[in-house]
Amino acid sequence: MSLHRLHIDTFRNIHSAQLLPSSGLNLIYGDNGSGKTSILEAIYFLGMGRSFRSHLSQRVIQNEQEQLTLFAQLQKEEGLLKVGLRRYRNGDIDVKIDGERIKRLSVLAETLPIQVITPESFSLLFEGPKNRRQFIDWGAFHSDPQFYLAWANVRKIMKHRNQMLKTGSAYSQIQFWDKELVNYGALVTEIRMQYVDSLNAQLKGIIGEFLPRVDVKVSFSRGWDSKTELSQLLENQYPRDLASGFTVSGPHKADLRLRVGNLPAQDALSRGQLKLLVCALRIAQGKLLKQQIGKNSIYLVDDLPSELDAQHRQLLLRQLSETGAQVFVTAIEPSAIVDSLQTPPSKVFHVEQGQVTVIE
Ligand SMILES: Nc1ncnc2c1ncn2[C@@H]1O[C@H](COP(=O)(O)OP(=O)(O)O)[C@@H](O)[C@H]1O
Ligand SMILES: [Mg+2]
């Protein structure tokens, strides 16, 4: 699966752009502030219905404009698929797939799996569990069709449970909800656990190349201690939950542990090495998806050269191309990418003040 045609309208500083990307490696270059990240952000927005840069989606709408429009033709095995998205300043969003309006953004994510690596998103992975949990859940969502609903139910019940805790409900009242929570929570945890297991198998080889001689361990932490059943935990921790006004532990606290030897990865690795670790995680995730359901992800790598020496740029570009997926990378200087490649990128785009031109 790849983007065959992409139209971007009134998105950040891009007033109107049309791209015909290659299904292989696409290089986007231009000066600071020209609009490189905005192009990647637009692709991500089309796949996720939100930005990777800002929680406030209206910020991506071009100043003075009321809406943004994104349109793509996806090249699928079955043929071309049209995906369109329009986002209005008042928050409304319209999404159409092959002319048919869709209500759930998850359908979009299913259609267009995207892996993004940016200088900001890679540090996020080391800041708190939320982003690492999202990383696991991206894979769990794509690899198991049961995950989406089970996780949505966990979140819904958890919200309700926390409201009850805040108003001081007795455990006998909460217990009813806990039964549901335990059922869905167990399923979510099982899918996540299996997912991280499969991911680890993929990761080994990639980490071996990117970070040889570094003892990286990736493990799953389910969100509460490993000896207690979820039903027991919820009952036992009720007094504590009541005092806190929220549920202290449970599947909503699941995490991906990234360690080097006995240290958290962020304390043991340099920034360049952390970037390589994140790239390894994302590539492993894409490869696993391909293996599990035969779907290729689209890789967006913003400012690929930064933090990496020539050898590691080369390694990363090779690993990306070996996935067989469509890849978009950005750089200020094209040579920073081209010099690390054995064959030239399939397509090169230059961006200047939001204007995109293809370089033949
Ligand atoms: N909503 C917006 N409307 C118009 N321009 C914007 C908007 N949001 C950001 N910009 C501008 O878009 C430009 C491109 O940003 P960006 O894509 O991050 O550039 P690059 O990645 O090439 O350095 C910036 O100069 C920024 O000020
Ligand atoms: Mg940028």
Image: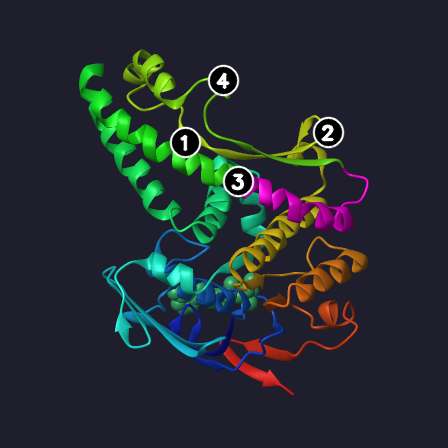
For the residues marked 3 and 2, what is the alpha-carbon distance in whole angstroms? 23 Å
Residue 301's image quarter? bottom right
Residue 162 in view (yes/no): no
| Numbered mark located on residue 312 in the image | none
Quarter of the picture holding the C terminus: bottom right
Q: Nearer the viewer, residue 330 or 167?
A: 167
Which region of the structure is painted magenta? 194-214
Task: Categorize mark 2 by other alpha carbons within 10 Å: few (<14), some (14-19), many (20+).
Answer: few
For the residues marked 4 and 2, what is the alpha-carbon distance in whole angstroms? 24 Å
* C-beta proximity under 8 Å, tags 4 and 1: no
For the residues marked 4 and 3, what is the alpha-carbon distance in whole angstroms? 18 Å
Give the mark nearest the N terminus, 4 or 3.
3
Tag 1 residue: 251
Quick check: is the Cβ at mark 4 less than 8 Å away from ligand 2?
A: no
Q: Nearer the viewer, mark 4 or mark 1?
A: 4
Tag 4 residue: 227
Give the mark nearest the N terminus, 1 or 2.
1
Tag 3 residue: 194
Q: Nearer the viewer, mark 4 or mark 2?
A: 4
Q: Nearer the viewer, mark 3 or mark 1?
A: 3
Give SS at disc 2. Answer: loop
Using residue 346 as the reference point, say whether residue 246 is left or right of it.
Answer: left
Give the mark nearest the N terminus, 4 or 2.
4
* C-beta proximity under 8 Å, tags 3 and 1: no
Where is residue 238 shown, x and y percent of the image? 30, 15
| Numbered mark located on residue 261 in the image | 2
